[in-house]
Image (tube, grey):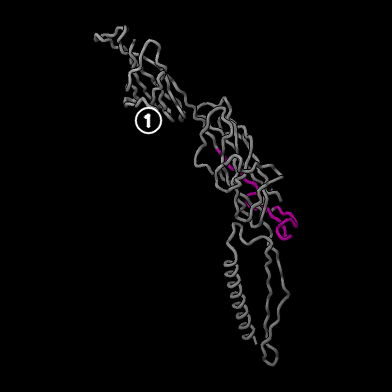
């Protein structure tokens, strides 16, 4: 009898282990794994079995009552700054964009209230946050007029387990921010169901009517995003040399003046759309084909190269010029 009881117990254990393995495999095939494990609201059901032999030796079994437990909703969230490096800006610029990812690290759908901290210290200046936007077309880039302005309590992002949302923070850089200064803004996200010390429970507020339990993140998270000021400046100097027909430098009729325009960018970063121009002075005539940029000849026509002469003035487009760069434009005129 004792041997039969032990044998039946071993058999039941093996049966339950097999069922558990099949159940786990089935669950893995039916749904993907989530950051916090089994989905909130899932019912975990278990029935135990006892076996014994009747006096006549007939094996018999009896099932226990069914025990069902509902998986609680775990409230967790992460925030991550998305930009690969400091967002380069300049004093006084508005609409400067930082990008963040908010991810539901819990096991149930949850909405999150977003906010910012721009005066948390540890930086050189405090950006002025002007708006938050949600990435409406999910392309990862801020699109003015397309992405949706975020309004707390109105369109808080609701995320499935492991789901993410891209959030854009727009700021204005203070006028007094100096070259090389860095300023940060933190994006914050807090679960709307509740937050607090890990393990805090909100009865009946979880998915499927179960409880909601604060996870390891406290159901709130934040991350720093950084701006960097790169303030470039342009110095522009004009000089002239004269060569007269006699091999000297007298400034009389027939003498040729070579004008040199020197543009130097200093500081950090770059300046965009730099263009230099100079009107041919009265009493002189422009010398065709004399226009150069960094000693390379430019055509007088408005064509594919950077320079042109329109009959009254020369102009040369320098494009974007990085700090530490000097560009030299030269042209000649003859005194009438």
Q: Position of residue 44 (x, y in %)?
A: 67, 67
The quadrant in which residue 97 appears is top right
Residue drawn at x 41%, y 28% as measured from the top left: 318
Residue drawn at x 38%, y 10% as measured from the top left: 283
The quadrant in which residue 174 appears is top right
Q: Nearer the viewer, residue 28 or 150?
A: 150
**Can residue 326 be spotted in the picture?**
no
138 is higher (above) or lower (below) than 275: below
Q: Nearer the viewer, residue 210 or 277?
A: 277
Q: Residue furthest left?
A: 247
Magenta span has 208?
Answer: yes
Q: Nearer the viewer, residue 277 or 218?
A: 277
Q: Which residues are magenta?
A: 200-225
Quadrant into which the C terminus falls: top left
Quadrant into which the N terminus falls: bottom right
Q: Which residue is mark 1?
A: 305
Residue drawn at x 60%, y 81% as measured from the top left: 11
181 is higher (above) or lower (below) than 24: above
Q: Position of residue 236 (x, y in %)?
A: 42, 19
Local crowd size for mark 1, using a 10 Å CA cut-off: few (<14), some (14–19), many (≥20)? few
Q: Residue furthest bottom?
A: 56
152 is higher (above) or lower (below) than 51: above
Judge left or right: residue 321 versus residue 1: left
Q: Position of residue 227 (x, y in %)?
A: 54, 34
Tag 1's secondary structure?
Answer: loop
Count of marks overlaid on the render: 1
Q: Position of residue 14 (x, y in %)?
A: 59, 77
Residue drawn at x 55%, y 27% as measured from the top left: 91
Judge left or right: residue 195 versus residue 324: right
**Can residue 188 be spotted in the picture?**
yes
The quadrant in which residue 123 appears is top right
């Amino acid at each position: 009898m004792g041997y039969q009881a032990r044998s039946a117990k071993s058999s039941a254990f093996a049966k339950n282990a097999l069922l558990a393995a099949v159940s786990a495999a089935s669950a893995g095939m039916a749904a993907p794994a989530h950051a916090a494990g089994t989905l909130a609201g899932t019912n975990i059901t278990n029935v135990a079995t006892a076996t014994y032999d009747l006096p006549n030796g007939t094996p018999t079994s009896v099932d226990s009552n069914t025990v069902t437990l509902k998986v609680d909703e775990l409230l967790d969230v992460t925030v991550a700054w998305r930009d690969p490096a400091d967002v380069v800006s300049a004093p006084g610029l508005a609409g400067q964009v930082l990008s963040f990812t908010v991810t539901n690290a819990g096991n149930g759908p949850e909405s999150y209230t977003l906010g910012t901290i721009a005066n948390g210290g540890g930086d050189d200046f405090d950006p002025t946050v002007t708006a938050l936007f949600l990435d409406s077309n999910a392309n990862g880039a801020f699109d003015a007029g397309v992405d949706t302005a975020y309004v707390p309590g109105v369109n808080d992002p609701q995320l499935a387990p492991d789901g993410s949302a891209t959030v854009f923070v727009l700021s204005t850089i203070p006028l007094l921010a100096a070259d090389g200064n860095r300023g940060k803004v933190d994006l914050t996200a807090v679960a709307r169901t509740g937050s607090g010390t890990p393990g805090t429970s909100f009865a009946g507020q979880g998915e499927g009517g179960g409880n909601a339990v604060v996870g390891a993140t406290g159901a709130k998270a934040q991350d720093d995003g950084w701006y960097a000021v790169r303030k470039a400046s342009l110095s522009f100097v004009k000089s002239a040399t004269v060569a007269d027909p006699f091999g000297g430098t007298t400034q009389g009729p027939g003498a040729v003046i070579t004008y040199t325009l020197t543009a130097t960018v200093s500081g950090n970063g770059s300046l965009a759309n730099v263009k230099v121009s100079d009107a041919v002075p009265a009493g002189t005539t422009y010398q065709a084909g004399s226009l150069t940029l960094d000693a390379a000849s430019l055509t007088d026509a408005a064509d594919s190269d950077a320079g042109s002469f329109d009959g009254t003035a020369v102009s040369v487009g320098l494009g974007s010029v990085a700090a530490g760069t000097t560009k030299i434009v030269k042209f000649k005129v003859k005194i009438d």
